[in-house]
């Protein structure tokens, strides 16, 4: 009997270790950022973001994002934001940097909350709406496939016009490689019944309707050579790294692109060679 009790006790201990811990009520006021998985929020103690003055070649976009985030942090009317365009041009980094800049003047005024489209946004908005703080809910690299009309329409409803629209102290910021967010096809511009609906303009309007719900829509375009080199120069000067333009250009050629991300990767290479940790 004792052996059986010992076995049951060991099984119970094992099950307790496997079971996820009971989630305590999220403290939405004490941290700079959170990650929402649909049921619980994980606090992020430090919001890692590049310095705004080191983000080059996107001056207009930077001014618009930072200004809008500061409005939200101050409790004033602010826009939902769509940042779309070329990969690696700092869309996500700029959102983090904008929130970090707003927190510098008042850490408890605003927080960044990263989520995904299907992660129970309605429950998240309900929780955030009860808090005396502003929140920027961030959805990174959003894109809906052509057949996923439901997901796009739900997000449209949350943005504007729906019964469960996000509360006044919450705004959405979305990054996407596509301006329309929803996948589009060339056949939408034609008039063939086989290719789609009788009125293809309706299909195009429906897909663009999601992008239209964002009060602030900012395009990020491919990096020029001068901007690429200016990004590297800014970081190299800040961290005391030696470099040459010829080597920087060769680095971009090997990767087949010039972007802020490629520039940052080159800066990491320089730092590694110099034995420095960025």
Image (cartoon, helix red, strand yellow):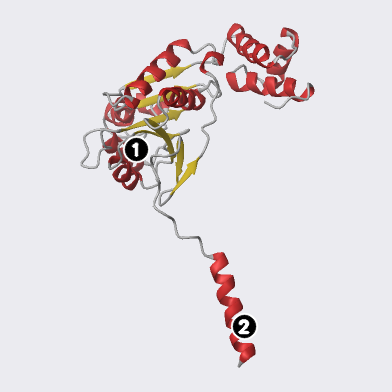
Q: For mark 1, what is the residue?
A: 152
Side of 247 where 10 appears, left or right: left
* Residue 180 x/y as whole percent: 38, 27
| Whether residue 142 is situated above or below residue 235 in the rendered picture | below
How many numbered discs? 2
| Residue at disc 1, secondary structure | helix
Q: CA distance from mark 1 to mark 2?
A: 52 Å
Which quadrant holds the N terminus? Answer: bottom right
Q: Is residue 167 above or below residue 236?
A: below
Residue at the outermost top position: 226
Q: Quadrant of residue 244?
A: top right
Q: Nearer the viewer, residue 42 or 224?
A: 42
Mark linked to residue 233: none
Residue 153's spot in the image, x, y percent? 30, 38
Q: Quadrant of residue 226?
A: top right
x and y, in percent, of residue 229 in the image: 64, 9
Element type at marker 2? helix
Q: Nearer the viewer, mark 1 or mark 2?
A: 2
Mark yes or no: residue 4 visible: yes
Residue 79 vs residue 252: left or right? left
Q: Which residue is mark 2?
A: 7
Residue situated in front as seen by the camera: 251 or 37: 37
Quadrant occupied by the C terminus: top right
Residue that appears at 59% across and 86% down: 5
């Amino acid at each position: 009997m004792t052996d059986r009790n010992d076995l049951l006790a060991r099984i119970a201990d094992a099950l307790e270790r496997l079971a996820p811990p009971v989630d305590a009520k999220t403290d939405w006021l004490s941290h700079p950022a959170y990650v929402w998985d649909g049921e619980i929020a994980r606090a992020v103690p430090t919001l890692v973001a590049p310095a705004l003055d080191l983000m080059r070649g996107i001056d207009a976009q930077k001014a618009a994002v930072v200004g809008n985030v500061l409005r939200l942090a101050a409790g004033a009317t602010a826009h939902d934001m769509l940042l779309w365009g070329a990969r690696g041009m700092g869309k996500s980094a700029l959102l983090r940097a904008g929130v970090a800049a707003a927190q510098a003047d008042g850490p408890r005024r605003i927080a960044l909350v990263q989520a995904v489209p299907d992660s129970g946004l309605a429950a998240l908005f309900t929780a955030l709406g009860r808090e005396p703080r502003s929140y920027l809910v961030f959805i990174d690299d959003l894109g809906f496939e052509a057949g996923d009309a439901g997901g796009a329409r739900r997000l449209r409803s949350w943005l504007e016009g729906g019964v469960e629209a996000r509360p006044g102290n919450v705004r959405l910021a979305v990054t996407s490689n596509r301006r329309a967010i929803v996948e589009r096809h060339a056949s939408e511009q034609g008039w063939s019944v086989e290719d789609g609906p009788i009125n293809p303009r309706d299909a195009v309007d429906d897909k663009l309707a999601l992008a239209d719900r964002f009060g602030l829509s900012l395009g990020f375009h491919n990096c020029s050579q001068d901007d690429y080199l200016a990004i590297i120069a800014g970081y190299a000067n800040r961290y005391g790294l030696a470099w040459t333009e010829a080597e920087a250009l060769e680095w971009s050629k090997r990767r087949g692109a010039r972007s802020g991300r490629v520039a940052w990767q080159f800066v990491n290479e320089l730092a590694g060679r110099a034995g420095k940790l960025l």
